[in-house]
Amino acid sequence: MDKFEGKRLFWKVADTLIENGDTTLRDDALEVVERGILLSNGYCILYNYKKGIIKIYDREMCLVLGVQEKDAELLLSLKEMFLNVEDV
């Protein structure tokens, strides 16, 4: 694993959320500030344009997790964990 793998994964996820987004959040000026996807369980994963954060919200739109590019190693850890679970 090279030192940029986490950053590549972060931006791949962010780009996917932006390109395939079916859900948006707008500010008071009605400008889109977050775009992403609504999941079948009612949670959503959004990318915040202004802060550069991938956010996971629960059904009540309470923030569950936020990941910045500098914390991209967390995404790699989650990816590895989920891949290992699938192998079991």
Image: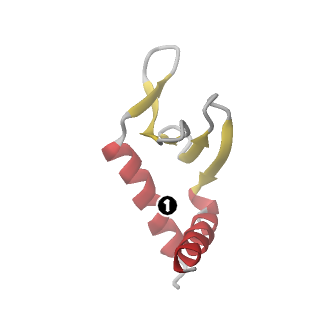
- Name which residue lies at 42% across and 32% down: 23
- Spot the residue most to the top: 29
Residue 33 in picture, x, y percent from top left: 47, 30
Q: Is residue 2 above or below residue 78?
A: below
Task: Name the residue type under label 1.
Answer: Phe
Residue 43 in picture, x, y percent from top left: 56, 39
Residue for badge 1: 10
Quadrant assignment, res 61: top right
Q: Is residue 74 above or below residue 57?
A: below
| Horizontal side, residue 69 vs residue 15: left or right | right
| Horizontal side, residue 79 vs residue 19: left or right | right
Q: Secondary structure at mark 1?
A: helix
| Horizontal side, residue 33 vs residue 72: left or right | left
- Name which residue lies at 64% across and 65% down: 74
- Name which residue lies at 40% across and 60% down: 12
Residue 63 in picture, x, y percent from top left: 67, 38
Characterize the local packing of mark 1: few (<14), some (14-19) or many (20 or more) Cα atoms within 10 angstroms.
many
- Name which residue lies at 54% across and 36% down: 42
